[in-house]
Amino acid sequence: MEIRRVCKEDLESFVKAYEESYRGLEIYAYRGRRLIKGYFKWLLARDAEGFMTAELDGKIVGFVACDTNWISLFELKKVGEIHEIFVLPNYRRMGVASKLLSSALSYAIEKGRDLAELWVGEANDGAKNFYVLKGFREAGKIGKWVRMIKEL
């Protein structure tokens, strides 16, 4: 598996993978290709170095976006904000998400961040359990979103 930085040419792969990965979790997803494309461009503009993709045998199978320019409203400092992480369903439970998350957290540490933060859908138990296994803990809730943090 190779983890590499995302480039503009990955836009269509991102849109397709995003739609497939959020199937069944649409309540937490952007809907419509135009919005998803806008989201991709926003992630790339926020912190291009922290926006990464996983490839297996030349096929893009997942993405992570770690924004080290993000100022947490709760911590009042810059954190490693994980805006997005997803893996195509057929490639789950193969270590792809773990490798993506590890790469994102290493990047945050490299940029001098001492805390990672993310928001996960309250009913997305699979993702919440994954983050707990990776050392995150719940740190609040707003609406349908649960805030999770991890000291780095």
Image (tube, helix red, strand yellow):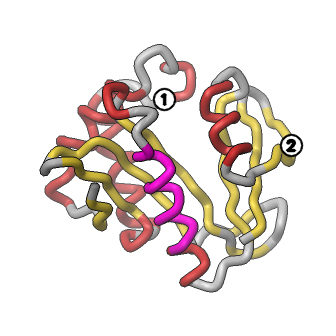
Which residue appears at 44% of the width and 55% of the height? Answer: 100
Q: How many marks?
A: 2
Task: Name the image quarter holding residue 17.
Answer: top left
- Marks 1/2: CA distance? 20 Å
In the rendered structure, the answer to whether residue 26 lies left or right of residue 147 reads left
Q: Quadrant of the N terminus?
A: bottom left
Q: Residue furthest front?
A: 94
Along the line of sight, the residue nearer the viewer: 55 or 121? 55
Which residue appears at 39% of the width and 38% of the height? Answer: 87
Magenta region includes residue 132: no
Name which residue type carries label 2.
Gly
Numbered range of the magenta stretch: 95-106
Q: Residues within 10 Å of mark 1 (few under 14, many from 20)?
A: some
In the rendered structure, the answer to whether residue 52 lies left or right of residue 123 reads left
Q: Residues within 10 Å of mark 2 (few under 14, many from 20)?
A: few
Name which residue type carries label 1.
Ala
Q: Main secondary structure of the magenta part?
A: helix
- Label 1: which secondary element: loop
**Residue 54, position in %: x, y?**
31, 53
Which residue appears at 39% of the width and 28% of the height? Answer: 21
Question: Mark 2 highlights which residue?
Answer: 140
